[in-house]
Image (tube, rainbow, N blue to C red):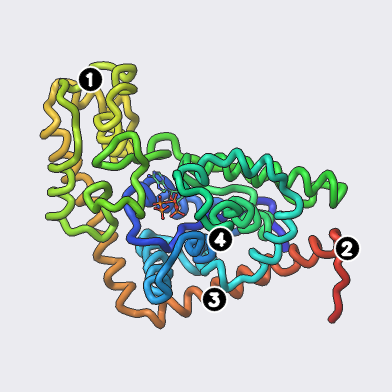
Amino acid sequence: MSFTNCVLSGVQPTGALHLGNYLGAIKNFVALQSDYEQSLYCVVDQHAITVSQNPEELRKNVRSVAAAYLAAGIDPKQSAIFNQSAVSAHTQLAWVLNCVARLGWLNRMTQFKEKAGKNKENASIGLYTYPILMAADILCYKATHVPVGADQKQHLELARDIATRFNLEHAGYDFFPLPEPLIGETAMRIMSLRDGTKKMSKSDPSDYARIHLTDSDEDIIKKFKKAKTDGGEMPATIEELEERPEIKNLLTLHAAMTNGTLAKSLTEFKSQNFSTLKSTLADITIEVVRPFRIEMTKVLEDTDYIDTILQEGAMKARAIASPIVKDVYDIMGFLAFK
Ligand code: AQP
C-alpha cells in the first residue's frame, strides 16, 4: 500500500515541548492532516536514545508527546500517532540505508557537529547516524512530504540523496518518492529567549530559554519579562534586525502567533519600547498555550487512552511500512522465507 501523497513527521521525547516545537512543527501537523491521503505522526523514541535517557523518564515523555499531538488537535482517526520503536520497519530499513549512504554525506551534517560539540570522540555512534534513521522513518512509508523546522532541512536533503541513490543503483526505477520538506515561513527557527543566536531547545539547561507548552500564565509572563534584549532602541527596518537577534526573535514569535509577517510585526512595534512588545507577546502566548495546557493535562490523566492510541497507530503504520521494507529486502537480494 503506498499513497500519492503522504505526510510524516516526528518529535523526540527528550523533555517538555516548547513553543519552537509547536510553531515550527506541530502546528503544521494539524493543518496538514486533512490535506493528505495519509498522515503519520511519530514519537521518535529511538532518536531520543542517541543521548543518554532515563528509561522511566523516556516512557513518560513518549506519552507526553503523544498527549501533545492530541491536545494540538491531531485526530487519531485521520492520522496514525505511534512511537517509532513499535514499528520495526524503521530500523530494518535503516540498516539498508546505512549501506546506501556515503560517509562523506554524513560528515557534512551540521547538527551532529553542534550536538556533539567539542567532545566528538565521546558522542554515541547513534547520534552520528541519526540522519540515516530519519531517512528510514520517512522512506519506510514512501512519505512524500515532511513538515519540519529549518534545523531539519539538511537531514531532509540527505534523505532525498539516499532515496535517489537507492532508486538509481539498486531499484533501477523510482521506487522511493523524493520527500519534500514543508518548512513554515515565519516560525522556521525560533530562538532561545536568553540568547538570540541559539535555537530554542528542550535540552537547553535554562528553563528561561524557552516557553513550555505546559507553562502557567505566570511563568509565561515571567519568562518574557526576563527575555534578553539589547541596549538599543526598537529597530526601524528589517535589515537592522539582522544585527539584533534577540529583538528579531521576539518579533518573529509575534508574527508566528498572529499569523502575520515579520515586517507587519515590526511596523506595529516600531515606535514602542521593548517592555510593550514583551507584555503583548506574553498575552498572545497565554492565549495560545492556555487551551493547549488544559487539554494536555486532561489527556495525560488517562494513560490507558494514550496507550490505545499509540497501539492502534502502530498497527496502521506497520501495515503501510512492512510491504515497503519487504520490497526493499527483495531488491537488495535477501532471501525471504515464510
Ligand atoms: N526552535 C525551534 N524552532 C522551530 N522549530 C523547531 N523544532 C525544534 N526546535 C525548533 C522542530 O520541532 C520538531 C521536533 O523537534 P525534535 O524534538 O524532534 O528535535 P530537535 O529539533 O532537536 O528539538 P529540540 O527542542 O532542540 O530538542 P533537543 O534539545 O532534545 O535536541 C522538528 O521538526 C524541529 O525542526
Instruction: Indicate yes or no: mark 3 CB to ligand 1 under 8 Å.
Output: no
Sequence-wise, which precedes: disc 1 or disc 4? 4
Left or right, 337 with reference to 45: right
Residue at (78%, 67%) from the top-left corner?
326
* Cβ atoms at labels 1 and 3 below 8 Å apart: no
The percent position of residue 148, horizontal first and vertical second, equals: 49, 46
Sequence-wise, which precedes: disc 2 or disc 1? 1
Q: Amino acid at mark 2?
A: Gly
Which circle marks residue 333 in the picture? 2
Left or right, 232 with reference to 251: left
The percent position of residue 115, horizontal first and vertical second, equals: 46, 48
The percent position of residue 95, horizontal first and vertical second, equals: 71, 61
Q: Nearer the viewer, mark 1 or mark 3?
A: 1
How far apart in space, not on screen, are marks 3 and 4 (Cα)? 12 Å
The percent position of residue 185, horizontal first and vertical second, equals: 44, 35
Quarter-wise, where is residue 312 in the image? Answer: bottom right
How far apart in space, not on screen, are marks 1 and 4 (Cα)? 42 Å
Residue at (88%, 63%) from the top-left corner?
333
Residue receiving disc 3? 312
Residue receiving disc 4? 40
How far apart in space, not on screen, are marks 1 and 3 (Cα)? 51 Å
**Viewer-side residue, 181 vs 114:** 114
Q: Amino acid at mark 1?
A: Pro
Q: Nearer the viewer, mark 2 or mark 1?
A: 2
Quarter-wise, where is residue 140 in the image? Answer: bottom right
How far apart in space, not on screen, are marks 4 and 2 (Cα)? 29 Å
Q: Residues within 10 Å of mark 4 (few under 14, many from 20)?
A: many
**Viewer-side residue, 290 vs 158:** 158
Q: Amino acid at mark 4?
A: Leu
Q: Secondary structure at mark 1?
A: loop
